[in-house]
Image (cartoon, rainbow, N blue to C red):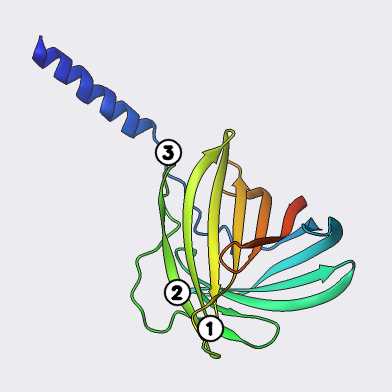
Amino acid sequence: MKTKFLFLYLLLLLSKNLLAKDYDLSNIFTQSFNFEAEILVVPANFKNSWINETRVIERNSSGVKVEDKDYENGNLKEIEYQWYDKNGIRIKYKDSSDEEFSIKNQDYNASFKNLGIGDKGVLPTLYSNKGNKIKSNWKFFKEKEKLCLKIENTYFTSNNNIHEVIEYNYYLDEKGKIGSFLFNYYNGNKLLHLLEVKSKTINYI
């Protein structure tokens, strides 16, 4: 009898493993798309519109370079560049002020390939040419039956003080494409909630 129960238990575990689905999100940030969002300035309850154009401008065997153009209330606000490795991990970032962040020479094993619900991890730290740095962590889960990839970026000054924290929540379809998102911006170590950014439309090209 014990052998029968053990067999059934092992069969149940095997069936769960077979039914568990792996998700490949390695190209989530390396596709061309446009989005329109609404920015809520939280303390003042003031709203702005945000339109973004994300374009892949270079793709090779080692990774992808992406250009981000941001428009606020119809006016071009900034142009940023992101570099991602073949596993979808950001390894370099240049903002509109020409501050450039990169992973330097650190070893890392982060990847957005073959993710399962409940997976989480740490992304490589990005160091800037001005002494600042960005530390990030992520988790992949379901929220109200929607797939969600949450990435939290903590920005440190050259004095190692926390300047701001940005929380990105990407809600995905079963193919791993972004259907909607919700971003939250905080001052310091989440001391003050500054902005909430909610997507209105996302169009892949």
Label disc, if present, on residue 21 of the rendered structure: 3
Residues at circles 1 and 3 in contact by the CB criterion of under 8 Å: no
Q: Which mark is residue 125?
A: 2
| Rendered view: 24 above or below 73 | above
The numbered dot on residue 132 is: 1
Spot occupied by residue 18 in the image (x, y as percentages of width and height): 34, 32
Q: What residue appears at the point 68 percent right and 63 percent down from the top-left corner?
A: 32
Mark 3: which amino acid?
Lys
Residue 45 visible in image: yes
Using a 10 Å C-alpha cutoff, classify the residue at mark 3 as few (fewer than 14 neighbours), some (14 to 19) or many (20 or more).
few
Comparing labels 2 and 1, the label whose residue is closer to the camera? 1
Q: Residues within 10 Å of mark 1 (few under 14, many from 20)?
A: many
Q: Nearer the viewer, residue 143 or 70?
A: 143
Residue ID at (86%, 58%): 46
Q: Is residue 105 above or below residue 183?
A: below
Kindly report the distance in space between the C-alpha atoms of the residues bearing marks 1 and 3: 38 Å
- Identity, as a three-letter code, of the amino acid under mark 2: Thr
